[in-house]
Amino acid sequence: GRLTITVGGWGGRNWNDTLRSSLESRIDEVVGGIVACMEKHRIELAEEARKKALYQEARDRYESEVRRRQEERGKLSQFRRDAARHWRANRLREYIAAFEARAHESGPLSPEARDWIAWARAKADWIDPLTDVTDPILDAPEPKPPNYWSLP
């Protein structure tokens, strides 16, 4: 016949019948203690929710900053690639001009030389990111090797 009231888990509160007093005689103390435990629990839950919200905000800021930095690095990398391609295209154009000037020194251009110069200019333009040129061979999809099992 000993009655115990327990509120909460670890760190909670217990009230027991004792030899000197029963729980019934201390009901006001027990109810007050239960209300205090509930208030403490409510405050702990609110604090936990506040911390979770702060953590989520910090996490969102962190992820946003990481994403921003990755995007910036990607844009910078693309900028460097484009600048290098533009530089290479201009060096090729200089070479083509020198080739054409040398070819003119020995007389009129041969059809092969004119074809090569046109081809080379088209490739230099294709390399240059500042020109919007497509190449029917280099921009075409990669050919797929034949599959023996799918032959008719």
Image (tube, helix red, strand yellow):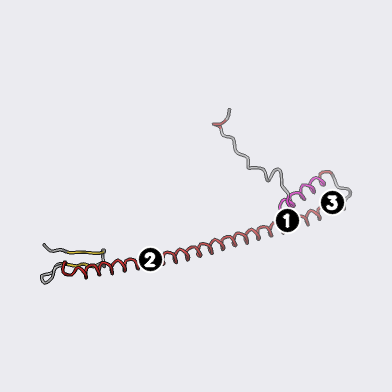
- Report which residue position mark 2 lands on: 48
Which quadrant holds the N terminus?
A: bottom left
Left or right: residue 148 versus residue 134 is: left
Q: Report how far apart the C-alphas of labels 3 and 2 lie in the structure.
A: 81 Å
Mark 2 lies on a secondary structure that is: helix
Could you tell me residue 132's position as x and y percent?
A: 73, 51
Earlier sequence position, callout 1 versus callout 3: 3
Q: Quadrant of residue 65?
A: bottom right
**In the displayed structure, would residue 73 be above or below residue 29?**
above
Observer-nearest of 26 and 38: 26
Tally the numbered discs: 3
Who's the residue at 64% across and 42% down the image? Answer: 141
For residue 130, the mark is 1
Earlier sequence position, callout 1 versus callout 2: 2
Which is in the foreground here, disc 3 or disc 2? Answer: 2
Could you tell me residue 116's position as x and y percent?
A: 78, 47
Observer-nearest of 76 and 125: 76
Q: Specify few, some or many for label 1: CA neighbours under 10 Å numbering under 14, 14-19, or 20 or more.
A: few
Does the residue at mark 1 contact the one at mark 3 (Cβ under 8 Å)? no
Q: Which residues are magenta?
A: 113-132
Mark 1 lies on a secondary structure that is: loop
- Report which residue position mark 3 lands on: 103
